[in-house]
Amino acid sequence: MEFYTGKTGQDRVLRAFDFGTLDTATYAANDVLTSGAIAVDATRFLGFSGVIERVILKETSSGTLQKPNIRMWIFGSAITPAARNSPQAFNGTQFDTLVGFFDTGINWVDGAAGVCVLQSSLDIKYVCQPTSKTLYIVPVLQTSSKTFASGATIKGQIVLRRD
Amino acid sequence: MNNRYLGMTGEDNSIVEFKLADFGKAGNEYFEEIGLIMTNGVISVTAPTQVGKIEKIRLLQRAGIYPAYRFISMRFWLFNKPTSTQVLRQMQNFTSTDMDGLIGFTDFKGTNYTPSPDTTWEIGGDYDSLGDNTMTLENIVDIPFVLDETQRIYIVGENIGDARTYSDNTLFAYLYLKMD
């Protein structure tokens, strides 16, 4: 890599992500919420680093908002987690690339009918693996027994401070 | 905006000041319910930077009638896009699309917050040269933001405290920003 005068230092970027289609069958505690890991473009170069500063989640539903407590597992390289609505079962190789995790808690705040948001201020340092510029997020349900209505969504924003 | 030029790297501090609401102009306002909008719609301010961090928010209240300052509690919503219309004294009604632009929010749990406040309005002097009573309240926050090219931040206040009536009060806010 090369650095040029005036282009050193950190920057700050905003990324959006989406949990995709949620299962309408009831999730149990420790079940993976999504089909696969969520990829987030996170570094300027392969193997570079940064800080996760903030995450905002938004749940929408035509039914009852579930407002779940979610453990967000974050990896510095691509992984294939357990299937959607199956128990999390990360293996040793996958944990070798673990960046960290955080629990969202349940301080969801309502907007209009059918929408609520949650914010987390974080300070999670990350380094992507040498072949990756991407973080991979696997959301796992902490709260037991949550059932999402058809068409319910969870989307989010993440603020990254990139080295 | 991610380009950095010689002499423009690093961080800097800045303050953005703006008026949040003037409860006196339209007559007395009674905020009897949690969730009522306390600002005159959506307040739009221009930040000095497109990317940065909000480190502190301070409210200043000026009351023209002694001692009509009010120990309010407010949820201070911040967005990077215009939201749907929000109306003074009507219930907060942010849509899913609105929330896509959410930068964050902070709660000023003032003296009328139930079950217990975590901050106290500091009362300034009695009538000053402007004929005002003043009081102030601040929250230390840590809210990074990324704005679009307009560098606008959109702000809405929502009542989260017990009922209060305003007679001739004006609210100002100061955002203390750290620019990238």
Image (cartoon, rainbow, N blue to C red):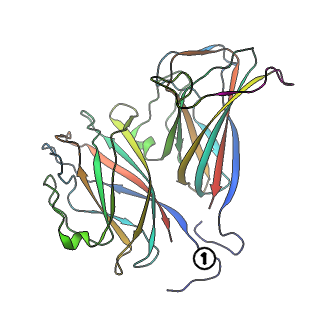
Q: Residue furthest bottom?
A: A2
Classify residue B127 as left or right of residue B172. Answer: right
Q: Which residue bears the numbered disc 1?
A: A7
Residue nearest the viewer, comparing A72 with B97: A72
Residue B88 lies, with reference to residue A12, above or below; the image says above
Residue nearest the viewer, comparing B151 with B18: B18
Q: Residue B9's x, y, as percent?
A: 66, 70
Q: Residue at x 36, y 81 (%)?
A: A130
Residue nearest the viewer, comparing B5 with B161: B161
Q: Which residues are magenta?
A: B121-131
Q: Residue A72's x, y, as percent?
A: 30, 55
Magenta stretch: dominant SS? loop
Q: Amino acid at mark 1?
A: Lys
Label 1 Cα neighbours within 10 Å, binned few <14 / some 14-19 / many ≥20: some
Q: Residue at x 37, y 38 (%)?
A: A107
Query: In which image quadrant can residue A147 be found?
Result: top left
Query: In which image quadrant can residue B1 be found?
Result: bottom right
SS at circle 1: loop
Q: Residue B81's x, y, as percent?
A: 53, 46
Residue B60 lies, with reference to residue A150, above or below; the image says above
